[in-house]
Image (cartoon, rainbow, N blue to C red):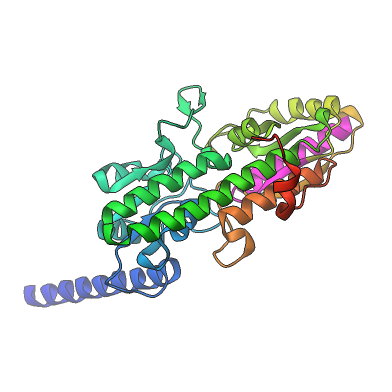
Amino acid sequence: MLKKRDDRFWCWLAGAWFMGMASLGIACKRDAGPTNSKRPLVVCTTTMICDAVRQVGGEAVQVADIIPPKQDPHIYTPRPRDGILFRRAHLIFVNGLHLEGKMIDMIENAGKKAISLAEDKRIKRRKTGASLDPHVWWDASFFAYFVEQIRDALVGMLPNKKQIFVSRAASYMGMLHKMHRWAKASILLIPKEKRVMITSHDAFFYFGAAYGIEVDAVLGISTDAQARAAEPLRLAGVVARRKVDAIFHETSVSQAQNDLVDSIQRLAKSKHGVDVKIAGPLFSDSLSEPGLPTGSYVGAFRANVEMIVRALGAKPLPFALQKRTTAGVR
């Protein structure tokens, strides 16, 4: 009798091991492309970071993402497969500043191979209450600091590929700085009194500070919180006073949180007699799937800027022409 129970246990254990390895293989195929044991595994938490690692690392590394596209990193719950990837990884890049709130233990246990990119000392971080705002990547000049750290870590891991990583990073950062100047010039085309963007949660402070637009939101910096009942009414008043043309949904928040933006629209009409349209959704804490135009950081950033400028009553500058039209913008 005991032997039969033991046999069943070992059969179950073997099956569990096989299924776990199979699920890991499927995940890696989705996230990292074809498996190549000669390439070191680099694991990233967010889609923005994954894209930057692919831009710098190219074919020299395998890249696996933890949080899938369109999912909210604030509330993402890690799965067993994520722990396996963390253990297998040669390097792990995370945002930090508690963006990956339910992964903190995993990140801390990874030790020195986990690098928190948003905690770069060159980035002046905003404090809200007891927390630091983690959404630093929507300032493209700050995202360039992410790229520098990724480059240096990859060079440390594969020094024989240094020239490749340095060259790819320089090209990518050149694009980021070019886009940074273009965004400033495009936002300036919005009438000054209408340069205000209202969104689902407070993900765009650094964007607003960098590009000259006031930002406001129903929720705070984390989506893992409850909105105060008075916030939609307050924001409806902002819409009326500023004659705002549009307010914005976001991609990675829940429908219930985007519904709070809809309530601002209803209150602006019922309390102030003002019509405001719903625009978006803006990319906030995630990109689209890889392969789509907005599956890259550059593509999502450009889509956000163009959407904001058009929704608030102006026409964005053509990106290809920005070098000739943004003289004096730094």
Residue 329 lies in what quarter of the image? top right
Q: Residue at x 39, y 75 (%)?
A: 34
Query: Percent from the top left, x then y, of residue 189?
Result: 80, 38
Residue 233 lies in what quarter of the image? top right
Query: Percent from the top left, x then y, of residue 275?
Result: 89, 38
Q: Residue at x 25, y 57 (%)?
A: 87
State the residue lying farthest toward the right.
Answer: 273
- In this view of the protein, can residue 135 be seen by the observer? no
Query: Percent from the top left, x then y, of residue 113?
Result: 27, 48
Query: Percent from the top left, x then y, of residue 176?
Result: 57, 48
For residue 90, side relative to residue 302 (left or right) = left
Residue 203 lies in what quarter of the image? top right
Viewport quadrant of the C terminus: top right
- Looking at this view, is 328 or 105 the one in front? 328
State the residue lying farthest toward the top.
Answer: 129
Q: Looking at the image, is 267 positioned above or below residue 23?
A: above
Please identify the dominant SS of the magenta region: helix
For residue 165, side relative to residue 220 (left or right) = left
Q: Looking at the image, is 25 positioned above or below residue 313?
A: below
Q: Looking at the image, is 303 positioned above or below residue 216?
A: below
- In this view of the protein, can residue 189 be seen by the observer? yes
Residue 263, magenta (yes or no): yes
Please report the bounds of the magenta region as a residue range.
Answer: 247-270
- Looking at this view, is 68 or 64 the one in front? 64
For residue 267, side relative to residue 30 (left or right) = right
Residue 19, magenta (yes or no): no
Q: Residue at x 11, y 73 (%)?
A: 6
Viewport quadrant of the N terminus: bottom left
For residue 112, side relative to residue 230 (left or right) = left
- Number of numbered discs overlaid on the protein picture: 0
Q: Residue at x 47, y 54 (%)?
A: 52
